[in-house]
Amino acid sequence: MKILDVGCGYGRTLNELHENGFKNLKGIDFSQAMIDRGLKLHPCFNISKHNGEKLPFFDNELDAVLLIAVLTCTADQNSQKNLISEISRVLKKGGILYINDYSLNDDPRNLERYEKYEDKYGNYGIFELPEGAVLRHHSSEYISNLTKDYQELIFEKTIYDTMNGNKSNGFYYMGKLKK
């Protein structure tokens, strides 16, 4: 299988896949520092910097694409739709899309920040961290609409520990491209 990890960072997930027998792996990330770290740790990996709108792959080239905490870091709805469209372009018919990300929360801290930034960003669930990051949490309905060109195979809710030590709702999704 040809597998792409979008937002691969330094290749942690690619390394786990490699250790479990997968060999045709590719990764892209927008951070050159993460790519440099990944190539230092795993010099044989095929990872590269990418920050454009068009994925650097041929139509129908890949068997699976992974998005792990990428949608959260891509707060803009049009950018998310473009990314999923590009993934659909590069996936073979019946190809697998795997998403692991954050869901909307209902605790006071998150409700306050969702409401605080809703007018600024035009979407409920987008918020800013003090460090300057703009992030987004998603409803199940939004993910279902975003992946409408896929046959849902798995959608499971879960709880994650965030990088700031909080608990957050999350999900993992797996779908098969219908085209």
Image (tube, rainbow, N blue to C red):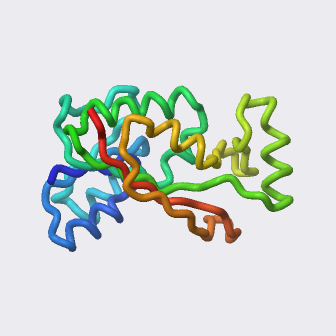
Left or right? Give the position of 93 relative to 140.
left
Q: Residue at x 82, y 52 (%)?
A: 111
Q: Quadrant of the N terminus?
A: bottom left
| Number of numbered markers | 0
Q: Is residue 47 above or below residue 77?
A: below
Residue 86: quadrant of the picture: top left
Tell me the residue at 62%/54% (across/down).
Answer: 103
Q: Residue at x 72, y 50 (%)?
A: 129
Quarter holding residue 174: bottom left
Residue 70 pos. (x, y %): 48, 47
Please say whether residue 34 is visible from this viewpoint.
no
Residue 117, horizontal then vertical, whole percent: 79, 38
| Image x and y of residue 50, in percent | 35, 36
Give the residue at x 44% y 36%: 148
Instruction: Classify residue 119 as left or right of residue 88.
Output: right
Q: Position of residue 82 (x, y in %)?
A: 44, 28
**Which quadrant holds residue 141?**
top right
Q: Measured along the vertical axis of the image, is residue 19 above or below residue 87?
A: below
Asked if residue 175 lies left or right of residue 15, the reply is right
Can the viewer see residue 106?
A: yes
Name the image quarter holding the C terminus.
top left
| Above or below: residue 158 compared with residue 57 | below
